[in-house]
Image (tube, coloured by chain):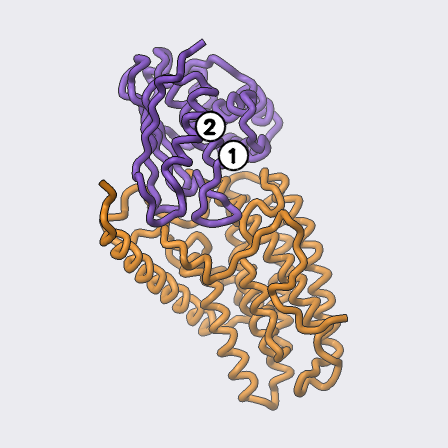
Amino acid sequence: MVDVSTAKVTVTPTEFHFVKYEAQDIIDVVTELAELLGVANPIHVIVDETTPLSKLASEADGTSSDSTLTLRAESGALENTKRFTHFSAEAARGSLGRTLLRAKDRLRDDFADAPGDYDLTLAENAAWDTYCAGRLSRMGVELNKQRWRYNYRNRFGFSDDCDAAFEQLWSADGLSWAELAAER
Amino acid sequence: MRQFFPVEDLARDERFVQTNMAERMKDARTTVDIDAATAKSRASSNRLTPDRHDASDGARSLMHGIMVGEIQALEGAGRTAHDFAAGDGSGDTIPFELKLDMARQAWDEARHVEISVKLSDWMGTELGQFAENTVLFEAACSNDPILRLAGVNRALEGLAIDVFTQMKEFGNLAGDPYLEFCEDWMLADEVTHVKMGSDWLRKVTANDPDRRKKALEFQQVVDKLFSFGGARGETDESPIGLARRFRELAGFSDDEVDTISKMDSEALEERKEAIRAFHAQADAQPTPA
């Protein structure tokens, strides 16, 4: 059992002007996710509140248990889509949960060759998102599987073979970057 | 049955949350480059195509917008069929044949709602997942039936032509056979709806140039609103393009499409100016210690 009591979460910015988000709400969600995913590393979340887009990225400044994990999120990734500019804990759980899982993957030796998130191809992104969303879903985080199936189909094709590959990836665990990248 | 239904009274269940243009435009975030300093992380093109990183989510959001737009178009056409007495088109009356066309349009829109619901399900979207902008129905609330034709059949349905063309192309490029096919089918109906509006507007105002002028001016106001701050336009800064060919088939002249394109550009520049002002205001606020 991993001791996550030391997981320290910080958020930038501390005050938001473009969206009605509270840094503490984001800290609460990430703290809960760190506990769920067994992550004890310090975590820094950087939100770009000037764009409504929803791109996410993760970085780890090392592979040790005290390496800082940086999660970057455009504000749309944490937003309540029924009420623009308002925070949604549910959306944040899904978005930051996937990103934290990516960061956790990056702590593994067999992910050393994984490109940075901004350098991934659209297909690599879709494969990794599917892999993360599947694991997150099995841990009890509420996600719409069909949304991720549609995202995967958009990158890999609308066919039975692609749907079978999606199911395999959604159910997978413990993959290396080489195995994940083989999805391309 | 009640006539002249206000937008606040539209029947929706608890899944739907409504918003309007004023609320929408208060959101000062942007995907367009307002200046070099904010160009970071913005896409090189905002056009909704599969090569955008957020392509599937963008398409899901737009599809939900189409679905609620179809509900409002159904409500608008149904109201026009009911709200005015049959007559020769003068005053508050409309020709009986125009009522029949509105009834047919309501039938088409009801089918579009069903198609859009199924497409949303296919794309992994729940009903009511995104806010519903009621601006489309607001264009259908005029007391003058000819202004409604201008606002709904020419401006709203014209926007539908642009949006369906964009989504059909998205489906084609992504290889999604259902999306491409369904959008193409609905697009064909929308071209007919615009043509109906163009024909009736000309016919009913044939001997009343002032009324025609007023209707076309109203259409321009609505068209600018439907640009959504430049979300529709001919440059890559706009997610939705202007479907010139299909608009031509629907009875828009080249001059009319040029005017709409110009208004789209103006709306985009006005939006950028408003966002620049908000950025300046935000920059002037003190940073917390």
Q: Which residue is mark 1?
A: A151
Q: Is B95 rendered above or below residue A37?
A: below
Q: Is B92 rendered above or below residue A82?
A: below
Q: Is B77 rendered above or below residue B180?
A: below
Q: In the current view of this chain or complex, which residue is farthest to the bottom? A: B207
Observer-nearest of A167 and A64: A64
Specify the chain shown as orange: B
Give the foreground label among 2 and 1.
Answer: 2
* Amino acid marked by disc 1: Asn
Q: Quadrant of the N terminus of chain B?
A: bottom right
Residue at 67% x, 63% y is B75
Question: Left or right of B258: which side holds B89?
Answer: right
**Percent coordinates x, y for residue B250 in the rendering:** 58, 67
Mark 2 surroundings: few (<14), some (14-19) or many (≥20) residues within 10 A: many
Chain A is shown in which shade? purple
Snapshot quadrant of residue B206: bottom right
Snapshot quadrant of residue B201: bottom right
Q: Which residue is mark 2?
A: A129
Secondary structure at numbered mark 1: helix
Residue at 34% x, 33% y is A72
Question: Left or right of B46: which side holds B159?
Answer: right
* Amino acid marked by disc 2: Asp
- What is the number of the mark on residue B188? none
